[in-house]
Image: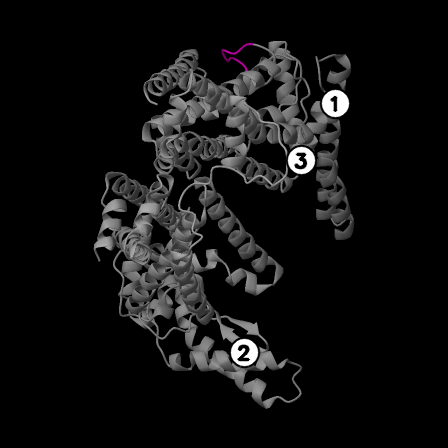
């Protein structure tokens, strides 16, 4: 057990490990504490309603929602609202409670229908159903038979659902688990310690057993810590939970065949999470043992996650159910295996997904334990980092002594940077392929009008506006006239409907035309040309997505730079290459210069991959009409301190974004040199740079004030209309860039 405790001390009890766990746990608490389950219902109202409904007798429980709703509608309720602060929220809450009560009330009938359907299939010899359908119905009847006669009571479903269903918690736990499992392998492998450890008596078997047990302990600890906190927060926000009530009393769990109480299910839930996290920890450990490069671990995890999500989605929408249930995402969710009763067709026989869930977990766990043991104790185990590609025998190759070529080779080939860039290209292509290249509704008509009105206002354009307005008024008068004739029985209902359809089609562009009139008044008042602003507003943060898409693009850019540059630079130290470089003539200075050039090229390529697709998409959908005109021609950009043509405004936005990317690259290189460890450098940079972007996307805007989010978006800074803020932002970026560059020059000049 000494090896086990040593692994625990090395991962969980060190400051970096405890810091990652604490940061992830704090983030999880913040997100759950600010989560709003229903847009129209306050959390306190849900808590009051659950407490009130839970103590009502069954007879009054069935009647109360309808009676209370009717009293509110007729004004017969003399007291104040029972749960919410306003009438709309109260109505919405009542409807939600009625749905939950309906499930409880109709549960006996639901069980009776299951038994009746199975019985009908047995006695109906003329029924056109397959043998599998009969077996499936009979299996369902047997599964639900122990529940017949069960009476359900109202329980606090909100506490239960919020305590057991949180995708954010799963992501955070898996992220922490990944960091801990990688920490068990990367440092020892990068420093060549495995050769020493494997040479000791019983070193191989004892060491891998200690690592596997430490991974299992990490799964247990993270499950109890994170999901235990979720349960505490749910009880605090939504009220107490009756642990002795049947599981089927929870809203949405009436389709479960588990014959257990809520408390027993929570124990099963925690056990399932522990086993799933442990198995996934074994998978990460196997990737770390097999990988000859740190980046391969990250690539392997991304590929596994991508394949799982693809199978999960394809199985759900294509009808190939086996794909939906045989993947890591389904296993991580856990609740999908227990919430509904569902059988898969295996050669004509129904197999419950609960069996599939546990069978998959047990088989994966056993196989991964064996593979970890076999690979680590085998003769052909790669105990260190692969230095390069094996050259084919007999192939003559001219030596290249260029330092830039060697660094570029390490960056793209040895470090697998080309894989990260390819994945980024695929992700961008997948995102924009799904988007529509057409505008619809009012925006379509508005675009047509603005293309017709483009440029300076003249007499012809004013006449066109006057005629269009006249046509709209005539159509409205026609509709009003026909409605009066119909009221006087002069025309039939069919004639009125025909007129209404005709007029409605002609009046469809009216809302867009009103926008055009407003723009024409603005242009006449300020002496500016008419410019269609749809695409420009999307690019400058005034579109439908606001700054959300800016942060998403920045998140991809930052994550790509971290995964590209942190292993590239930190690996030089962890592999001991910097000491060798330092012995060469001008080795450190030239290496620093070349690494800086590689980092700059990485920034250029990543920025092109991230930002160019949107520019192309905007051009295809909206166009760049009037790009040579002054930005003041667009009302939302007028009265700004950037007075110039639209192309210059656009160049300013993307120029500042590239500056922020360059600063990011410099910071990544500086932190990598400081930590001298790939896993730590990646984790710190993700927490400092990528995490605040994720918080903004989730709606937590407080992160914008303590991070570089404003500089990544640029629009957030420019739209404040404050010149001092822009100047201060540029100065801060330049200072960060200069500070990172000076630190790199001093550190790499001193070390060797």
Front position among marks 1 and 2: 2
- Decide: few, some or many residues near mark 1? Use Cα within 10 Å; few <14, some 14-19, many ≥20: few
Location of residue 685 in the rendering, given as x and y in whole percent from the top left corner: 38, 32
Front position among marks 2 and 3: 2
| Magenta stretch bounds | 638-643
State whether the magenta stretch is mostly helix, strand or loop. loop
Q: Is residue 348 left or right of residue 201?
A: right
The N terminus sits in image quarter: bottom left
Pick whichever of labels 2 and 3 is earlier in the sequence: 2
Q: Secondary structure at mark 3?
A: loop
Please name whichever residue, 409 or 320, is drawn nearer the observer in this view of the structure.
409
Q: Can you say whether 646 is above or below 415 in the image?
A: above
Q: CA distance from mark 1 to mark 3?
A: 17 Å
The C terminus sits in image quarter: top left
Q: Is residue 701 left or right of residue 507?
A: left
Please indicate, yes or no, whether residue 593 appears anywhere in the rendered image: yes
The residue singled out by tag 2 in the image is: 136
Q: Can you say whether 16 is above or below 460 in the image?
A: below
For residue 378, which quarter of the picture? bottom left
Query: Does the magenta portion include 309?
Result: no
Location of residue 594 in the rendering, given as x and y in whole percent from the top left corner: 48, 20
Task: Please give the label number shown on residue 452.
Answer: 1
Q: CA distance from mark 2 to mark 3?
A: 47 Å
- Decide: few, some or many residues near mark 2? Use Cα within 10 Å; few <14, some 14-19, many ≥20: many
Q: Residue at x 49, y 18 (%)?
A: 656
The residue singled out by tag 3 in the image is: 439
Please name whichever residue, 237 or 517, is drawn nearer the observer in this view of the structure.
237
Pick whichever of labels 1 and 3 is earlier in the sequence: 3
């Amino acid at each position: 057990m000494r090896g086990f405790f040593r692994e625990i001390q090395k991962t969980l009890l060190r400051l970096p490990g405890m810091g990652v766990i604490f940061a992830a746990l704090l983030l999880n608490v913040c997100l759950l504490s600010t989560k709003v389950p229903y847009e129209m219902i306050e959390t306190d109202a849900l808590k009051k309603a659950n407490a009130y409904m839970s103590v009502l007798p069954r007879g009054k429980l069935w009647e109360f929602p309808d009676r209370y709703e009717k009293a509110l509608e007729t004004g017969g309720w003399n007291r104040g609202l029972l749960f919410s602060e306003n009438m709309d929220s109260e109505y919405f809450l009542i409807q939600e409670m009625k749905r939950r009560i309906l499930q409880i009330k109709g549960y006996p009938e639901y069980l009776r229908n299951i038994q009746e359907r199975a019985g009908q299939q047995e006695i109906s010899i003329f029924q056109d159903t397959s043998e599998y359908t009969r077996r499936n119905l009979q299996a369902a009847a047997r599964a639900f038979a122990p529940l017949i006669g069960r009476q359900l009571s109202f329980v606090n479903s909100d506490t239960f659902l919020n305590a057991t269903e949180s995708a954010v918690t799963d992501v955070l736990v898996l992220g922490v688990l990944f960091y801990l499992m990688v920490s068990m392998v990367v440092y020892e492998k990068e420093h060549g310690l495995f050769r020493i450890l494997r040479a000791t008596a019983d070193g191989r078997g004892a060491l891998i057993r200690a690592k596997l047990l430490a991974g299992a302990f990490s799964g247990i600890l993270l499950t109890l810590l994170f999901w235990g906190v979720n349960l505490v927060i749910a009880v605090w926000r939504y009220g107490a939970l009756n642990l002795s009530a049947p599981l089927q009393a929870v809203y949405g769990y009436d389709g479960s065949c588990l014959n257990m109480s809520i408390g027993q299910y929570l124990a099963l839930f925690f056990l399932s999470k522990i086993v799933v996290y442990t198995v996934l920890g074994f998978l990460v450990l196997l990737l770390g043992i097999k990988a000859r490069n740190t980046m391969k671990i990250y690539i392997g995890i991304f590929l596994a996650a991508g394949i799982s999500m693809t199978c999960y989605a394809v199985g759900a929408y294509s009808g190939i159910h086996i794909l939906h249930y045989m993947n890591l995402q389904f296993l991580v969710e856990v609740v999908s295996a227990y919430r509904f009763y569902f059988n898969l067709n295996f050669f004509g026989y129904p197999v419950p997904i609960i069996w599939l869930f546990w069978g998959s977990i047990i088989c994966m766990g056993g196989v991964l334990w064996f593979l970890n043991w076999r690979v680590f104790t085998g003769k052909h185990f790669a105990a260190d980092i692969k230095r390069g590609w094996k050259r084919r025998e007999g192939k003559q190759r001219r030596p290249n002594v260029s330092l830039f070529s060697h660094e570029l080779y390490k960056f793209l080939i040895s470090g697998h940077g080309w894989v990260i860039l390819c994945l980024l290209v695929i992700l961008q292509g997948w995102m924009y392929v799904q988007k529509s290249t057409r505008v619809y509704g009012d925006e379509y008509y508005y675009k047509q009008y603005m293309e017709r009105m483009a440029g300076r206002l003249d007499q012809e354009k004013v006449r066109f506006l006057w005629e269009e307005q006249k046509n709209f008024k005539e159509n409205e008068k026609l509709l009003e006239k026909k409605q009066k004739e119909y009221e006087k029985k002069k025309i039939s209902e069919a004639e009125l409907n025909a007129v209404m359809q005709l007029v409605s089609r002609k009046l469809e562009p009216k809302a867009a035309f009103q926008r055009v009139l407003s723009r024409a008044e603005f242009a006449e008042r300020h002496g500016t040309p008419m410019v269609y602003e749809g695409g420009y507003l999307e690019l400058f943060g005034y579109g439908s997505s606001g700054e959300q898409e800016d942060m998403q693009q920045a998140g991809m850019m930052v994550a790509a730079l971290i995964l590209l540059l942190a292993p590239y630079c930190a690996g030089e130290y962890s592999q001991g290459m910097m000491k060798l470089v330092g012995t060469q003539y001008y080795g450190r200075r030239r290496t620093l210069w070349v690494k800086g050039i590689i980092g700059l090229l990485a920034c250029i390529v990543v920025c092109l991959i991230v930002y160019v697709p949107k520019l192309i998409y905007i051009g295809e959908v909206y166009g760049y009409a009037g790009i040579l005109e002054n930005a003041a021609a667009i009302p939302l950009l007028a009265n700004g301190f950037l007075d110039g043509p639209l192309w210059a405004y656009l160049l300013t936005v993307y120029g500042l974004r590239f500056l922020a990317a360059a600063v990011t690259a410099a910071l990544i290189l500086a932190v990598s040199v400081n930590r001298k460890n790939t896993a730590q450098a990646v984790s710190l940079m993700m927490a400092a740079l990528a995490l605040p972007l994720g918080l903004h996307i989730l709606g937590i805007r407080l992160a914008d004030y303590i991070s570089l989010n404003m500089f990544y978006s640029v629009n957030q800074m420019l739209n404040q209309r404050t010149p001092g803020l822009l100047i201060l932002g540029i100065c801060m970026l330049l200072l960060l860039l200069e500070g990172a560059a000076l630190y790199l020059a001093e550190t790499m000049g001193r070390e060797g």
